[in-house]
Image (tube, grey):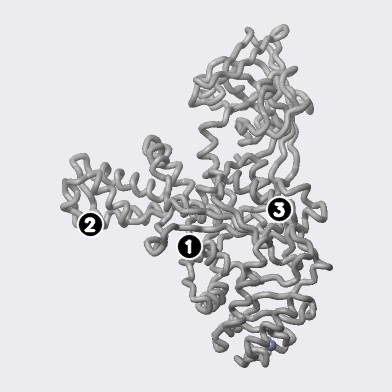
Amino acid sequence: MIVTEKGQVLTSNGTTETKETIRRIALLNAISHRGKAEVQPVLGKVLAEHPHLREKCRQISAVVSEIVEEVNKLPPEQQRVIVEKAWPEALAKEKIEEKRTLPPLPSVEKYERVATRFAPNPDCVLHLGSARAIVLCYEYAKMYDGLFYLRFEDTDPRLKKSALQFYDLIREDLRWLGCEWDDEFIQSDRLSIYYKHAEKILMDGNAYVCTCRPGKFRERALAKQPCPCRDLPSSENLIRWRHMLDGTFKEGEAVVRIKTDLTHPNPAVRDWPALRIIDTELHPHPRVGHEYRVWPLYNFACGIDDHLLGISHVIRGKEHLTNQRRQEYMYEHFGWQYPEAIHYGRLKITGASLSKSKIVEGIRNGIFKDWDDPRLATFAALRRRGITPEAIRRLMIDVGPKTADVVLSWKNLYAHDRKIIDPIANRYFFIRGPKKLSVENVPQTFSVNIPLHPDQPERGFRHFKIEPQEGKASLWVSSDDLKLFKKGKKIRLMELFNFQVQKVRKQLVEAVFHSRSYEEARGIGAPLIHWIPVDTGIPCDVVMPDASVVEGFAEDACKRLRPNEIVQFERFGFIRVDALVEKLTVYFAHR
Ligand SMILES: [Zn+2]
């Protein structure tokens, strides 16, 4: 073997063999890294496979760079197609290796035990936008044999009012996702804990009860000036605190503020509000009614709980960075150590509306039928469509806790899901918009057995029998395939026989038998279509992701399906069985 000056690799068979090896490794690397291969890992693998190339490492490296660059120019779909064609066995192997893991957590050794928490406000069901926080917190806790907590943050009975149904719906969502929690806390059960800490911090002079009008306070804060309440003695603050609790102060008349550096560059951090009064006669809390009138704000309750529950790692979106700054002042006042905080970048999923308020509003207006309306990206909707929780988990592990913003699409989720369900979903024929096909001169009765899964004959078969009446066989075919039906055109009915189109009428296609074998169909380039015998099958409604309904017939074997089964309608897509009464109702997952 010679490496030429230009970096070309010459083997005994010329240059191609080694270059092809590099190309294969680069393509596989690209496929498992969202379309972008990297030189170093590719080079490493090339040298591992061909140790004799190590002496020429520098030249090989140049060839690898060149090939990686070429490969990265290809769209990911094409990369996959090339590999599937040239090295199908390599792709199967790569699938196993592809299982990614999360990068290690920082400073684990500082803590006795890793503890993480997912802390939703029970004012809506969970959706894809919550998946990252849940999956990362859960997976990290498991990775370090730690604890994963569920904490309901329901301390705003006014603006972010929780509702009883959501506590249970959220629990159901988490269970479905496979993220079982080790312990559960509800902040509305913990008011006395927050009160105790409020008193302590007021007594220590690190907080004060501010009775200034919010506008006036803001003006002063912007000017980095203290308000008159700030320097009141703690005895006076404790009296004011009592007056907040006993109703002397009304809603909006007093707030507890945590002292911070008044010159902090972000005015929103300066002396932030920790507890306020809510008129719970007017706005009762769904769990505790009007038992309490002083309610902690987000940073106060969250900060205290994270400490008291022994949370070691707070994993959340970077929009919380300011909240960390705020809470750090409080931690300092209490003499506590702030947990390790990991702030990941924004995650956008194109085509998915992740706005809680839009979901809630749409439900209220009747635009969406329920939380599992297929147009929503709620877990309930994904569940109904048959998207597996494992696919969501894999996607989120894939994205990981990186700080850069990430844009995903439904396609990314579907790709993960397809890998999971393709090997387990049985195949059936579904005829969308059925049209009758009548074939003459059929020479015999056809009994065909089609495997439930093409790669797994051990799963069994679906049986079809075509008994021609006076040489005539009648079948349902899909109106999607009508465009193929031109006079004289030869077409193959999958696994059955080949026919030639004679006449295309509105409700009926007339044809004549052509031949039996698949080889013959292939020889003449006949397209393959699916079918079911007339007088068989079950009416089937497919609810699509846009909530429209596609009507058709599913083959007889579908009468034995059970709700929740996920199967593939051939040439149509994966579906989840929703109900089977007189007709079959299924939800479309993806192609
Ligand atoms: Zn004030």
**Place of residue 375 in the rendered image (x, y in percent of width and height, measured from the top left):** 70, 49
Q: Quadrant of the N terminus?
A: top left
Classify 453 as above or below 216: above
Q: Cβ(mark 2) to ligand 1 < 8 Å?
A: no
How many C-alpha atoms fall within 10 Å of the one at disc 3: few (<14), some, or many (≥20)? some
Q: Secondary structure at mark 1?
A: strand
Classify 419 as above or below 57: above
Q: Is residue 223 left or right of residue 398?
A: right
Amino acid found under the numbered disc labelled 2: Lys
**Place of residue 107 in the rendered image (x, y in percent of width and height, measured from the top left):** 39, 64
For marks 1 and 2, give the one nearer the viewer. Answer: 1
Residue 146 in view in this figure: yes
Q: Secondary structure at mark 2?
A: loop
Cα separation between marks 1 and 2:
51 Å
Considering only order in the chain, which callout, 2 or 1, is on the residue closer to the N terminus? 2
Cα separation between marks 3 and 2:
65 Å
- Front position in the image: 387 or 80: 387
- Residue, disc 2: 6
Considering only order in the chain, which callout, 2 or 3, is on the residue closer to the N terminus? 2
Q: Residue at x 72, y 8 (%)?
A: 469
Q: Residue at x 61, y 24 (%)?
A: 491
- Residue 166 is tagged as 3
Q: Residue at x 82, y 52 (%)?
A: 366
**Place of residue 3 in the rendered image (x, y in percent of width and height, measured from the top left):** 18, 51
- Residue, disc 1: 313
Classify 300 as above or below 243: above
Amino acid found under the numbered disc labelled 1: His
For marks 3 and 2, give the one nearer the viewer. Answer: 3
Q: Name which quarter of the figure residue 563 lies in.
A: top right
Total numbered labels placed on residues in the image: 3
- Front position in the image: 166 or 193: 193
Residue 509 in view in this figure: no
